[in-house]
Amino acid sequence: MNRFLGIDLSEGIQRRHLIAYFIAAFVSSSYAGALAILQPGLLQVMNIAPADQAMLTGYLSAMQEIILIVLMGVMGALADRFGRKPVYVFGLLATAVGFTLYPHASSVTELVVYRIIVALGSAAMIGMMVTVIADYSRDSTRGKANGLQGLIATLGAFLPPLLGALPKVFVDQGFDELAAQHMTFACAGALGVIGAIVAAFGLAPHVVGTASATRESIVYMLREGAKASRNAGIALSYGAAFISRGDLAVTGAFMSLWLVQFGTGVMGLEPSEAMFQLAVPRVMAVVGGALVGSLLMGYISDKVTRVTAVAMAAGLAAVVYLAIFFVDDPTAPWVMALLGVMGVAEISAFVSSQALVGERAPAARRGAIIGLFGVSGAIGILIGTAGGGWLFANIGPSAPFVLFGVLNGVVFIWALVVRSRSG
């Protein structure tokens, strides 16, 4: 048995394949928050009215999530037929092309077209990021494998802020604002090209699909993947994907917004001061918790049953998110500690859900099943951002967090029921 970084590798998988995967996963995860940071500056340069910018941002984000919901299962089924590598390479290249074209849009219509290209690439890229690690690791160390993947994903989240600093660097060098945007997005696109090259030459060459699968229609493969939810563990993993991605979306979308609004409205700070003094340190507390939690839950997932790990993660997240209800002052010192635990809870739900679906999904249907797992996550993101935005505006800043605290509680009870029935 081949072992690397504490992971028992599947038959035929070499160390170089795992290293190539981690590089591709780093690039894939860095794309997740890149548009949220880069797009506001581009919309300003395009002279889109501030009131329209908010509506357009919401529309483009919702459109991307809908495309992910529609296509992630399809991409998974294609990976079962043709193999993981070509689908992953396509995803990275399509995302790279979309980012490179994005700042060249001269109208909202062109922005929509280029965002669709990004969404197509993301549907393939995100699905394969989860599927490949499930293929490459044996069940004995699947938790550690997903923990390391969660660590890589967290490190990838540091890259978008660096990209966000590039426009100023280019402007300071004498380029105009539009040229600075072109060059920044081109740098983002180059990351995808590098990731695609690494994936093309570094991932394992084998095609996972069985001989019978290559003769099946995509619709049939998706139907069979959906039928797999009759397995209680797979159904639970879909629910865990929903809350884990929703948790991340709610924290990412609304914690900084709450802090900036509190800083400007209550403390009298300028927006930039509120972001630097209040939001950045607390976001870093969440990220720091995630770095710890990814390795911790990866270890725990291999020491207990995967259903138990999901229950532990969902239970912790339920307590943390419900505790936000008691926050009146988000700058209070105890809230900083709570946000660190929130980072642990978020990534724990992410890692444990992936370990569970990887364990329960049969290899021949793994792509389609994990594609539907990704669909559940995309729905969680859509509800977390769209529904959470309405709750934030109409009920209060803590409302989106409380909603997902309740939903995490539901998954916690669900996991306990599955655990009791499985003995």
Image (tube, rainbow, N blue to C red):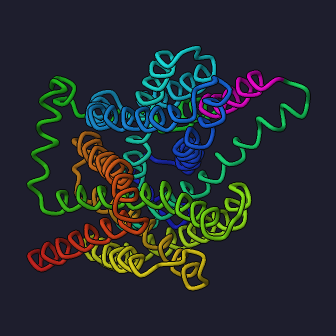
Q: Who's the residue at 71% across and 27% down the image?
A: 181
Q: Residue furthest right?
A: 173
Q: Position of residue 415 (x, y in %)?
A: 20, 72
Q: Residue furthest bottom?
A: 334
Q: Is residue 187 magenta?
A: yes
Q: Would you place residue 322 above or below residue 403 in this image?
A: below
Secondary structure that dominates the magenta span: helix
Q: Quadrant of residue 232?
A: bottom left
Question: Is residue 168 or residue 161 the one in the foreground?
Answer: 168
Quick one: quadrant of the C terminus? bottom left
Question: Is residue 164 or residue 231 the one in the foreground?
Answer: 164
Q: Is residue 344 magenta?
A: no
Q: Position of residue 345 (x, y in %)?
A: 43, 72
Bounds of the magenta segment = 176-193
Quick one: quadrant of the N terminus? bottom left
Q: Using residue 197 as the reference point, say whether residue 83 is left or right of it.
A: left
Question: Is residue 337 or residue 423 the one in the foreground?
Answer: 337
Q: Would you place residue 267 above or below residue 375 in this image?
A: below
Can residue 138 be seen here? The reply is no
Can residue 367 be seen here? The reply is yes
Q: Who's the residue at 24% across and 44% down the image?
A: 372
Q: Position of residue 158 (x, y in %)?
A: 65, 53
Q: Quadrant of residue 395?
A: bottom left
Q: Would you place residue 386 above or below residue 201 in this image?
A: below
Q: Using residue 70 as the reference point, say whether residue 42 is left or right of it.
A: right
Q: Using residue 23 as the reference point, say whether residue 94 is left or right of it.
A: left
Q: Who's the residue at 52% across and 71% down the image?
A: 295
Please count the marks in the image. Answer: 0
Q: Would you place residue 34 above or below residue 413 in this image?
A: above
